[in-house]
Image: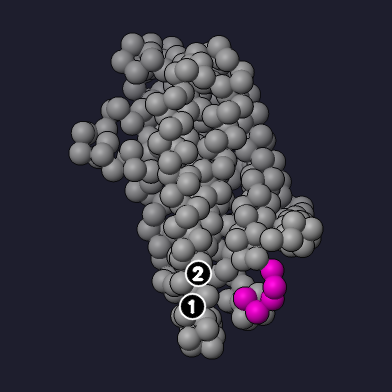
Amino acid sequence: MNLELEWLTFKGVLVRHFKEFVSYRTSVLATIVWPLPLLALNVYQYLGLASGQQVSQVLNARYGVSSFSGMIILGTIVYLLYNRMLWGTGATLQEERFNGTIESLFLSPANRMTVLLASGFSSLLEGAWWIAGVFLLSWAIFGIQAAIADWLAVVIALVSTMVALVAVGVFFASFFVLTRAADQVATSLQAPIRYLSGVAFPVAALPAVFQLFAYILPVTYGIDALRRTVVQQGTLTDLLGTLAPLYIFTVLLFLAGHLVLKRVEVQAKRNGTLYKI
């Protein structure tokens, strides 16, 4: 592996996606506005039953969550980042196929995994802008009582969640090409994952059978890690039980993405095209 060539590939993909992202300034600003109604819906569903203080007291007593608005904001941010990976990195190869350039990509000497990793990193950079914006606006509008005991744990939880979601994007990027149904699959996954991962409530509130499904989702562990460190005074030691499965899923998804990508290449060599896979 030539690291210089890999870096040139990585940089080229990164710059391309960045230019595409900043080409439409209105859409860049819109990315931090459109999630606010979703947040407002989740927050006011609770406030329709009791005051914010009362809701926080119940959640704190039952689940150790000191801020119900913080719980919702953090859950929504991780879910939005998951969506960004699903529709951004996950749709990378599908977009190349729609543009009629996927054969050229696979015929080039560029490492396909490097292309997908660069796409994932660019999605993180794009997501960092609107995640920060959404977090600050939500904090100002809805309020959040942070309970942080270990800033290092917060950073590790955030970085670990981002890397895990990049792995999700890399896996779906190859999987979508094989299925020829990227839009349908991505859309059908949104509601179940939003519900099962506990975006607007603790996963422990779910029926036991649904919790079984919840804990096979990397999004669940990412949300849990950030909630533990930001609104539950969690330390690095408290994160061990959450980060361990998150890292396992990360490795498995990267490996699965690599294997599926190899299968795509095999089919391309057999059929002479990727357009009709």
Residue stretch in magenta? 106-110
Secondary structure beneath label 1: helix
Q: CA distance from mark 2 to mark 1?
A: 6 Å
Question: Compared with residue 118, is residue 148 higher up or lower down, i.e. above or below?
Answer: above
- Colour mode of the rendering: one colour
Residue 239 included in the magenta stretch of the image: no
Work out whether residue 40 can be spotted: no
Question: What number is the disc on residue 141?
Answer: none
Instruction: Give the class, few, some or many, for how many residues have Cα within 10 Å of label 1's Cα (few <14, many ≥20).
Output: few
Please give the residue where the numbered disc 2 appears in the rendered image.
262
Amino acid type for the residue under numbered disc 2:
Lys
Could you tell me which residue is drawn at 56 percent across and 49 percent down?
A: 166
In screen coordinates, is 157 left or right of 20? left
Q: Residue furthest bottom?
A: 272
Residue placed at 47% from the left, 17% from the top?
237
Residue pointed to by mark 1: 266
Q: Are marks 2 and 1 in contact (CB under 8 Å)?
A: yes
